[in-house]
Amino acid sequence: MPNDGAVISTPSQNFLEFEPTRHRRWYERILLNTPLGRVLSLLLVALVPFYLGYGYWHSPAAPHQQLTLGLLAGAFLVNALLSRSLSQYPGGNLIAYQLAVTAGTIAVTLLAIVTLRLGYARKPLFIGFALLMGAQVVAVLLKARFRYTKFALVPGGDLTEPGNCRDFARFLTLKSPRDRRRFDALVVDMKAPLSDEWLRFIERQKGRDIPVLSGKYLNESLEGSVDLDGINRSDLRALKPNPLYLLGKRLLDVAGTLLLLPVALPLLALVALAIRLESPGPALFIQDRVGADNRNFRMLKFRSMRLPDGDESDRPRFADQEEHRITPLGRLIRRSRLDELPQLWNVLKGDMSLIGPRPEQPRFARSFDRAVPFYSYRHMIKPGITGWAQVQQGYACDVVDTRKKVEHDFYYIKHLGPVLDLLIVMKTLHTMVTGFGAR
């Protein structure tokens, strides 16, 4: 009989937020108990350093020792909160990003100590930081080995087992309603016809508090994109960002840009000089782009191409259509994204944000608005120097790629927040090193 959707639970959270529930045996509940593990890790990071630092059990009695205890406990709690929040997004569970968060937490703690000139117990502090890093490595490895979410797919429809998400989930396709394999959540294609036996099986899983999820939401959690075919205008109106958060984001943009200037200014001067020496023409390339609320602005970039012949400059083109004009230096600064550095001026002016959807040329934007559903809704926030679509996909070269880019943009707008921005920053640094998606 057809599935009318009555058995499907509408998920109120991201797939990646599910805690594994298949570990029901008594020893699994002890060894893989998340709250217990965090308490033990906190004791390890906050108290054990005093024993190791002094060679015997030394209760932190002096003020500087008590402050050190507080700093270690605070660093542990902040790191645990950020790590858990980061793991909710595609790629956030990768050990490189998890350890980067821990290293950043330690660096901020040390910066606070130096800036505020706090007295601290040196040995316990640095031993505690080493234990914090070690505990994070163990936690990531345990999660990869045991605490990943295991999804069971009910056969039928278009559901397939993804093969690119082993850092946070595993998938299996059930063979029959009598399949005894353990899982944490059930995924069903709502459009597929299901027999009475499968429907009874799904109802039994719901009775056991196993989440039963619609397959159409799967892609959002795995690839970080929102399916345009599954949304409507009322959904998009509900995505409108909180004005208070946008104000805070603007303050962070200005502060972040000012902090980057001491490093950026020498790079700007060196790159500009190199461009002028390599080929004739200005170092900067200025072009109209579409910003927030569909308003045009003048965006700055370093010129990475030879100047066009004739009237080619008046015709907007995709990046791959002009590769023949890219200079050797231009290819290098595109690969490393240094060509985007002048846009720090656009951020200070308020035309752009450090992080957001990439701005498009007006003629392309008008064309995409007709070809891609809900395209103009990506302009509800300011465009960014880097963004979720950039680090996940790279440059778009046609309407198909642009549609995928918009699906990533909608995911960013839907999950707009500081932790996702942090992940984008780390992915951007990775992109600058590897040159992913460069044109």
Image: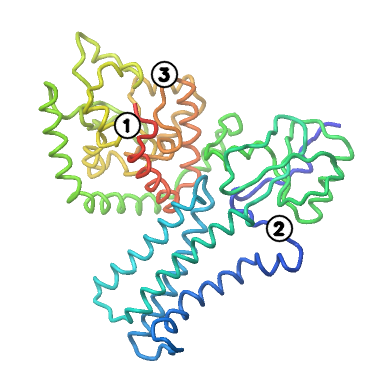
- The dot on residue 434 is none
- State yes or no: discs 2 and 1 in contact (Cβ < 8 Å): no
Task: Judge from the rendering whether residue 387 lies leftward or rightward of residue 220; answer left or right.
Answer: left
For the residues carrying marks 3 and 1, which lies nearer the camera in this image?
Answer: 3
Q: Residues within 10 Å of mark 3 (few under 14, many from 20)?
A: few
Counting other residues with Cα less than 10 Å from the Cα at mark 1, is it few (<14), some (14-19), or many (20 or more)? few
Q: In the displayed structure, does residue 60 sit left or right of residue 32?
A: left
- Image quarter where the N terminus lies is top right
Say if 181 sits above or below 39 in the image. Answer: above
CA–CA distance in space, label 3 to label 2? 48 Å
Q: The residue under label 2 is which amino acid type?
A: Thr
Circle 3: residue type:
Ser
Residue 7 % position (x, y): 79, 43
Specify which label sits upstream in the sequence, 3 or 2.
2
Outermost residue to the front: 55
Q: Which residue is mark 2?
A: 21
Q: Position of residue 85 (x, y in %)?
A: 50, 56
The residue closer to the viewer here, 10 or 134, is 134
Q: Residues within 10 Å of mark 2 (few under 14, many from 20)?
A: some
Residue 142 image point, x, y percent:
59, 59
Identify the residue at horizontal 20%, vertical 19% (top origin).
306
In the image, residue 292 sits, relative to residue 310, either above or below, namely below
Residues marked 3 and 1 touching at CB (< 8 Å): no
Residue 295, disc: 1
* Residue at mark 3: 367
Using the image as rendered, state which of residue 54 and residue 410 is in the foreground: 54
Q: Secondary structure at mark 1?
A: loop
Marks 3 and 1 sit apart, C-alpha to C-alpha, by 16 Å
Residue at x-position 11% and y-position 33%:
273
Q: Amino acid at mark 1?
A: Arg
